[in-house]
């Protein structure tokens, strides 16, 4: 499984990302949405999951939604979530209709990564080891 991490706050998400690397996933990090979109357009294989953080002005729900829609414009089959400080209801309302996975809190802990892993493996059909 390949995961794109998009933003400059990866250190605040690392414990959650470590869950994915321990399961054999590849994490590709991009400092900007533009860099991630360029890689996504050129990629022969598409990531299974993209995680956006609040950098690049994505602390605003409208800006986060626009970023998600930009990713989905390129590949609607990649699951997307955000590491955000948004209230769960605000996040849900802002991302309504986009099929977003449950958000990671900021900062994200190992337990948050385990919950996201469980959610992702319910959707992604691959040959990875699905042991939780």
Image (cartoon, rainbow, N blue to C red):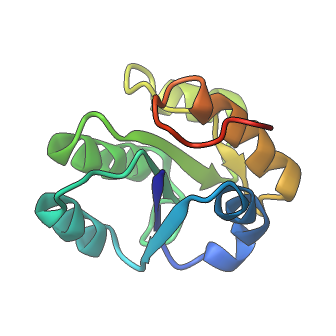
Q: Residue 101: give x, y in percent of width and height.
A: 55, 32
Q: Which residue is drawn at 70% across and 79% down?
A: 11
Q: Where on the picture, by quarter, is residue 115?
A: top right
| Residue 85 position (above or below residue 42) | above
Q: Residue 29: give x, y in percent of width and height.
A: 46, 75
Furthest-top residue in this view: 97
Q: Is residue 89 visible?
A: yes
Q: Residue at x 56, y 43 (%)?
A: 128
Q: Can residue 87 be seen in this view?
A: no
In this rendering, the count of numbered labels is 0
Looking at the image, residue 44 sits to the left or right of residue 131; the answer is: left
Q: Residue 40: give x, y in percent of width and height.
A: 22, 60
Looking at the image, residue 36 sits to the left or right of residue 87; the answer is: left
* Viewer-proximal residue among 22 and 105: 22
The C terminus - image quarter: top right
Looking at the image, residue 127 sits to the left or right of residue 31; the answer is: right
| Residue 61 position (above or below residue 4) | above
Q: Residue 93: give x, y in percent of width and height.
A: 52, 25
Q: Residue at x 38, y 43 (%)?
A: 65
| Residue 123 position (above or below residue 82) | above
Q: Where on the picture, by quarter, is residue 87?
A: top right
* Viewer-proximal residue among 83 and 16: 16
* Viewer-proximal residue among 99 and 95: 99
Q: Where on the picture, by quarter, is residue 6?
A: bottom left
Q: Which residue is drawn at 79% across and 44% down?
A: 114
């Amino acid at each position: 499984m390949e995961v794109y991490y998009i933003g400059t706050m990866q250190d605040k998400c690392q414990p959650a990302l470590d869950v994915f690397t321990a399961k054999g996933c590849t994490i590709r990090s991009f400092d900007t949405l533009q860099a991630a979109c360029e890689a996504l357009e050129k990629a022969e294989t598409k990531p299974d999951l993209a995680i956006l953080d609040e950098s690049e002005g994505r602390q605003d729900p409208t800006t986060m939604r626009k970023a998600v829609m930009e990713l989905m414009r390129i590949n609607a089959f990649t699951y997307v979530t955000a590491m955000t400080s948004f209230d769960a209801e605000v996040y849900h309302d802002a991302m309504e209709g986009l099929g977003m996975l449950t958000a990671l809190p900021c900062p994200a802990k190992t337990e948050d990564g385990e919950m996201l892993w469980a959610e992702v493996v319910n959707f992604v059909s691959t040959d990875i080891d699905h042991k939780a």
